[in-house]
Amino acid sequence: MKIVDMHVHCHEVDTGELRTLVEEGYVLVCVSDDYESSLRTLQLSDEIEVQPCIGLHPWEIGRQDYRSVVELVERNADTVKCLGEVGLDRQFVPETFDRQLDFFKQLLVLARDYGLVLNLHTPRAWREVYELLLRNDIERAYFHWYTGPLDLLEEIQEKGYYVGLNPAFKIQDKHRRVLEVADLERALTESDSPYEYKGLKLNPRLISETIDALASIRGTSRDYLESLFYRNYLRLFR
Ligand SMILES: [Zn+2]
């Protein structure tokens, strides 16, 4: 069994629990929030078999000098395969949008030059991020917990980018719609653990519920979906 968690803040999860999850067959793609947590994620990836992503979360951009993160990415671009959690956010932190954009554009150049996967945060900036990916010839990107418009979802997936399916579908109708219509060949499961969304404590183990719901909504089997998402993960990180 392989269960892919394409977006988990491992630096905030107990290391013993991470180890257990990996032993049970979970594929953990660990995103970072800032400079310090990026270092922690890199250290974790030396100790446990997880896929590290380094970066600076749009929510943290007002609090940190992002040049240190750009330098960290430059220093590690040969070995690390993924940048995250990065992106643009017009919904929760519109006041720092100009800084977000400046930082994100620098990352896009690095992502293109080194062929890195982008693990993206995009609330109310879905189309801007999508157009920036196209303009910068980005090949590999993942829209974490996609809640944007469904017509854009189709465009994103047609271009070969991936979208994230999160256990929040249980209480968030617009995300449940995404589970109903997304092209599963260009989708991946995630937890965004340990974030708590409206009382729902997100956890990698909830991904099973996403897979069960999908199997029922889309009239397919759990086994098929597990192997499909694992294949999608391998293709994205080829
Ligand atoms: Zn996150």
Image: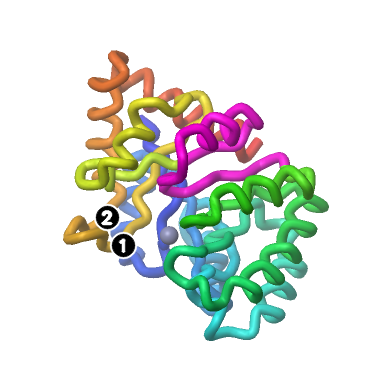
Spot occupied by residue 186 in the image (x, y as percentages of width and height): 53, 29
State the residue at coordinates (49%, 39%): 163
Given contact means CB atoms under 8 Å apart, are the residues at marks 1 and 2 in contact?
yes
Q: Is residue 229 above or below residue 167?
A: above
Check disc 2: other Cα within 10 Å, few if <14, some if 14-19, many if 20+. Answer: many
Residue matched to label 2 = 202
Q: Quadrant of residue 210?
A: top left
Q: Is residue 107 shown left or right of residue 224?
A: right
Residue matched to label 1 = 194
Q: Quadrant of residue 237?
A: top right
Count the numbered circles shown.
2
Q: Quadrant of the N terminus?
A: top left
Q: Which residues are magenta?
A: 139-163
Amino acid under label 2? Leu
Q: Nearer the viewer, residue 201 or 39?
A: 201
Q: Quadrant of residue 158?
A: top right
**Is 159 included in the stretch rendered in magenta?**
yes
Spot occupied by residue 183 in the image (x, y as percentages of width and height): 48, 25
